[in-house]
Amino acid sequence: MVRFRITGGELKPEIEMSSSGTILELKERIYELWNVEVARQTLFFDATELENDRTIESYEFQPFETLGLVVTPLSGDPKFDILVKSSTAEDCIRVRETQKVADLKKKIERRWGILAQKITLLSHSIEMNDDHLLSAYYVNRGSIVEVKVSIESR
């Protein structure tokens, strides 16, 4: 077994794979976890692009390695729907992966009437930074973004 830390965005998950598995199977696992289409994924190890048809053991990885993930942007920067949900509400919102997290907060503010400054967004349980693009958190068609609202006590 080899454990991989996947870097490239703001999420840095770890995935354990059998050494007899292929790089394509690793990409399929990334798709299952973050909904990033396999065709959009390129994996690198020490500046070497990993080939889909090769096995993990053919690269002679150590038991724990860090791989870089590059996600090819969607052609034409299209809009798509994501689900934003809090403990009391949920809504489909149209976004582009090139929009900033702050832009999504403003959309939620307009729809829900909650000041953007009181909103914290999470993707895969990781707090999203206002200055980063949605793509940094692998937000794409069908993603779910969690909304936390801070309420000041009186």
Image: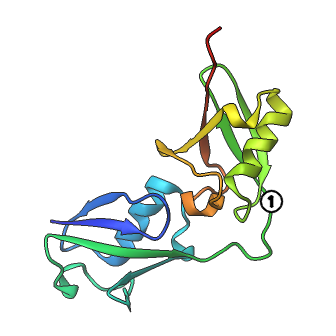
Image quadrant occupied by the N terminus:
bottom left
Residue type (three-letter) at the residue carrying disc 1? Lys
Q: For label 1, count other residues whose C-alpha is less than 10 Å away and answer few (under 14), some (14-19) or many (20+).
A: some
Q: Quadrant of the C terminus?
A: top right
Identify the residue at horizontal 34%, vertical 75% (top origin).
Answer: 67
Residue 107 placement: quadrant: top right
Choose top left, top right, bottom left or bottom right for residue 84. top right
Along the viewing direction, whichever of 40 and 44 lies nearer the viewer: 44
- In screen coordinates, is 104 left or right of 121? right
Frontmost residue, 131 versus 69:
131
**Farthest residue toward the right?**
110
Residue receiving disc 1? 79
Q: Is residue 76 left or right of residue 19?
A: right
Q: Is residue 81 visible?
A: no
**Colour scheme shown:** rainbow
Does 40 sit left or right of 25 as displayed?
Answer: right
Residue at figure coordinates x 31%, y 65% from the top left: 5
Question: Is residue 33 visible from the viewing direction of this image?
Answer: yes
Whether residue 7 is situated above or below residue 150 in the rendered picture:
below
153 vs 96, nearest the viewer: 153
| Res. 88 image quadrant | top right
Residue at the spot 35% in from the left edge and 70% down from the top edge: 25
Q: Is residue 73 left or right of residue 123?
A: right
Q: Position of residue 74 (x, y in %)?
A: 70, 72
Question: What is the residue that sits farthest to the top in this orientation?
Answer: 154
Give the SS element for disc 1. loop
| Residue plotted at (19% across, 66% down) | 18
Query: Residue 135 location in percent, x, y?
Result: 62, 63
* Image coordinates for residue 134, horizontal then vertical, percent: 64, 58
From the viewer's side, name the closer residue of 86 and 50. Answer: 86
